[in-house]
Amino acid sequence: AVNPSVAVLEGKLVISMGNGTAPKYLNGVTGVLEGELNLGSAKADAMTSDEMGNLIITNRAAAGETVNIYTTDALAKARQKAPDLQTGKEEIHTKRIGKR
């Protein structure tokens, strides 16, 4: 299944198809494809950006697998892994992400 999501980082439009493929980023003015995010072994699912200029990406996970949340504030910067969450659980722990 394809479940696309979009975000903005460094003036680029970042698109994740939500199917495990690497998100692509386009020039925010011309729409020209400029590259792919390097997520290493992570398989991208949902993605968003926040008001503080961070890109937040979750990996694809089936029921019972670990959901990893990655953040970065620059296209060329290595992503950082946030605390693990388990899918299928009622309790979800949250952590504030940002610079403020």
Image (cartoon, grey):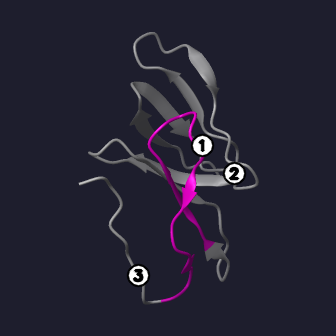
**Magenta span has 82?**
yes
Tag 3, which secondary structure? loop
Q: Which quarter of the image is occupied by the C terminus?
A: bottom left
Tag 1, which secondary structure? loop
Residue pointed to by mark 1: 17
Quote the CA–CA distance across marks 3 and 1: 26 Å
Residue pointed to by mark 3: 93
Pointer 3 with pointer 1, Cβ within 8 A: no
Q: Residue furthest bottom?
A: 90
Which of pointers 3 and 2 lies earlier in the amino acid sequence?
A: 2
Amino acid, disc 2: Gly
User: Is residue 76 positioned above or below 96 on the image?
Assistant: above
- The residue located at (64%, 79%) in the rendering is 63
Q: Residues within 10 Å of mark 1 (few under 14, many from 20)?
A: some
Amino acid, disc 3: His
Question: Of tags 3 and 2, which is closer to the observer?
Answer: 3
Q: Residue furthest left?
A: 100
Quote the CA–CA distance across marks 1 and 2: 8 Å
**Magenta span has 20?**
no
- The residue located at (42%, 19%) in the rendering is 28
Predominant SS of the magenta segment? loop
Residue pointed to by mark 2: 20
Q: Which residues are magenta?
A: 67-89
Front-lying residue, 85 or 97: 97
- The residue located at (45%, 28%) in the rendering is 13
User: Is residue 69 positioned above or below 12 on the image?
Assistant: below
x and y, in percent, of residue 89 in the image: 51, 88
